[in-house]
Image (spheres, helix red, strand yellow):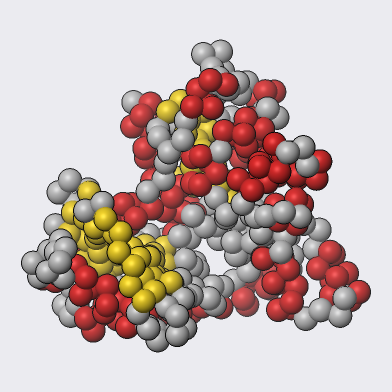
Amino acid sequence: MKILVLNCGSSSLKYQLIDMENEKVIAKGYFERIGNYDSFVTHKVNGEKYRYDVIARDHGEAIKFVLKQFTDERYPVIKSLDEIAAIGHRIVHGGEKFQKSCIITEEVKKGIEDAVRFAPLHNPAHLQGIKACEINLPGKPNVAVFDTAFHQTLKKEQYLYPIPYEYYEKYGIRKYGFHGTSHKYVSLEIAKLLGKPIEELKIINCHIGQGVSLCAIQNGVSVDTTMGLTPLGGVAMGSRSGDLDPSVVTYLMSKENMNPAQIDEILNKRSGLLALSGISSDNRDVERAIAQGDERAISSLKEYDFIIAQYIAKMAVTMNGVDVITFTAGVGEKGPISRAGICSHLTFMGVLLDPDKNNSVRDTEKEISSENSRVKVWVVPTNEELMIARETANLIKF
């Protein structure tokens, strides 16, 4: 069984074709600048990379081109598109309507459209991708896998904001949480690695990339998370502010005569580590500046790590303890400096790293805590595409 996994961004398309018999990726790629005259795709197959400059006016044209590559006689990975059993779509926001992955129907598409108000850049692109697959792969089931669904197990006291209840009733303003597919995948993987039933574990997963979110997972379900109504909430990120005093927003709007779009652009694209360091939203650039003795860079990474540690402690409070902390995504998997900085604030919880183990781990599953640590600490690479493929395969079997 072969599953096509699609992640349609506002002007991009990430894709993987996965053979579920061995869960191996047989082709993948990234289509960039969709809707522009200089759009292009990078297609990877059999260890080789190919770049094509292709004008794709919309996601439909991009997907049509990608499908042709799968059967291209120069590097065919399938003989016919009939070999694709189904398509799994990453959907950023499902609102309260979707508590799990589902086969896409007209009603489901309407639900995704209703959630556009929460994800105006992403959900419309997802709908374009679904439509393109319905046209180019007629009769094949399409499955929606929602970033928000994993967090629909949060209790009301975890997801409601302390603002007038009428705004929740009228507009659905509440904490939704994101990166759910990643949090679910890592929690299942760490349970296997520890050889314990997931129902017996208290897990804090730290998904740290350009976007950052933490998740408290108890009895195999999400019981708390850091991102909120949108992916702007929670800890400071690469270019996003995370949580801050709401009065900062109204104060800036008043003093700088800003409109909502301008303040949104500042908080989403000009804040976080980028703002603290004055250098970059990328940890690697900041770490290079630190190596050269840049005082602001040193201070910014310390603050960034400290904020994440504070929220790890918050997740532990929610579960009244923690058995294992996992690090995943770009920085989580490749950043021993930040992992050490974060965990240095958690010794009161019994968290102790083994420096040699921590410094040697990049992009692989490995424990990095010391023998004396009361809480286990692991690096577990995420694989959201494989999780989407698994969810898709499980749904179409029934």
Residue 235 location, x and y as percent? 67, 50
Residue at 34% x, 26% y is 195
294 or 329, nearer to the observer: 294
What is the number of callouts on the image? 0
Residue 197 location, x and y as percent? 35, 31
Relative to 32, does residue 365 appear above or below in the rendering?
Answer: above
Is 64 left, or right, of 356 in this rendering? left
Relative to 33, does residue 353 appear above or below in the rendering?
Answer: above
Residue at 52% x, 57% y is 178
Residue 386 location, x and y as percent? 31, 52
227 or 329, nearer to the observer: 329
Is 254 left, or right, of 104 in this rendering? right
Locate residue 194: give its quadrant. top left
Residue at 57% x, 21% y is 355
Residue 159 location, x and y as percent? 60, 56
Is residue 191 at all visible to an observer of this figure?
yes
